[in-house]
Amino acid sequence: MSLLVDALSQGLIMSLLSLGVYLGFRLFGTPDLTNEGSFALGGAVAAVLLVSGWPPWAAIIAASLAGALAGTFSGMLVTRFQVTRILAGILTMTALYAINLRIMGQNVVPVDNKHSVMGQAEHVGQWLFGTASAMARDFSLLLMLAVLLAVVTVALLAFLRTGLGAAMRATGENAQMIRALGTDDRPMVLLGFALSNTLVALAGALYAQYLGFTDVQMGIGMVALGVASLIIGETLMGSTQLGYTFTGTILGSILVRIIAALALHWGLRRSDLKLITAGTLLAAFLLPRAIGSVRAKRRSAVHA
């Protein structure tokens, strides 16, 4: 049971990451590599502020704003200096590595659970279940993360269905057409980069508190994880509508974490998690093609 709760909690946190990756990967056609730096930035800012005595949620908000600034900078490289999106992400991600080291002052910063969301979850567990046990804390944290994810998801869905959100989606699908209509697409690109990295930094801030430490390299491979969750989710749901896509992305994130948890339970090392993520991403790419090929052969056999 503890293994499942742990995987679900991490899956909910990574769902925020995957939603952020979605904004870059699906709305603008290419993954935003800034996300890897923003994930570590969120963890770094949150950890340092918590050590300095900030309340957990204030530290999380500050970390999210730091992610928005990183995304805005990357977007400025694209819109103002005509740098390609991939190169802009690489440049910002590289710069953020040094910035994160400056913020942290060392490679790893420990976080005291008593002064983080874990401590708050312990208090909530004691209030809900009448006990301060680890299981009560874990269930309370799971509930808190589920509520936060639901609020963020509903808010993001509502925004993307507004006129501004529709304009941002249209910019991602066909920026040339938007410019031909006399509309400046640069604010939409900036907004997309900022929103994407806000969500990713939020996930990083929560993940650092969940682990009890932040590492300057914790963002490595997170874009691949988000893309894998997105593709798995779309395969599961079989629809590209926003509501179904978001639901599938969340389910995909949880499934990836369950696979990783089972792999660790069966004896794999934590250092192998990146390999598991890469394998999951490869399977996510190949599985839809394999399913499509099988269906095509069946249709051919029926019409033959």
Image (spheres, helix red, strand yellow):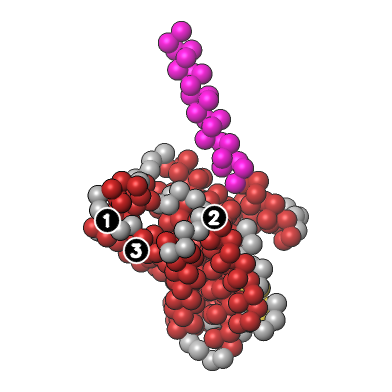
| Label 1 packing within 10 angstroms: few (<14), some (14-19), many (20+) | some
Instruction: Locate residue 139, reporting x and y percent.
Output: 50, 69
Q: Which residues are magenta?
A: 281-304
The front one of 273 and 96 is: 96
Do tag 1 and tag 3 residues touch (Cβ < 8 Å)?
A: no
Q: Name the main secondary structure of what is drawn in magenta.
A: helix
Q: Secondary structure at mark 3?
A: helix
Q: Amino acid at mark 2?
A: Ile
Based on the picture, tell me whether residue 125 belongs to the magenta stretch. no
Q: Residue at x 65, y 78 (%)?
A: 101
Left or right: 234 as drawn, with respect to 112: left
Residue 285 percent across, percent down from the top left: 56, 40
Does residue 265 appear in this view?
no
According to the picture, the residue beneath numbered tag 3 turns out to be: 187
Q: Name the foreground residue: 65 vs 47.
A: 65
Q: Mark 1 to mark 2: distance in Å?
A: 24 Å
**Badge 1 element:** loop
Identify which amino acid the numbered label 3 is placed on: Pro
Find residue 38 and report its image quarter. Answer: bottom right
- Residue 114, quarter of picture: bottom right
Say which of 1 and 272 sits in front. 272
Q: Which mark is residue 86?
A: 2
Q: Give amino acid for label 1.
A: Thr
The picture places residue 176, in percent across and down from the top left corner, at 35, 47
According to the picture, the residue beneath numbered tag 1 turns out to be 183
Task: Establish if 110 lies above or below 154.
Answer: below
**Mark 2 residue element:** helix
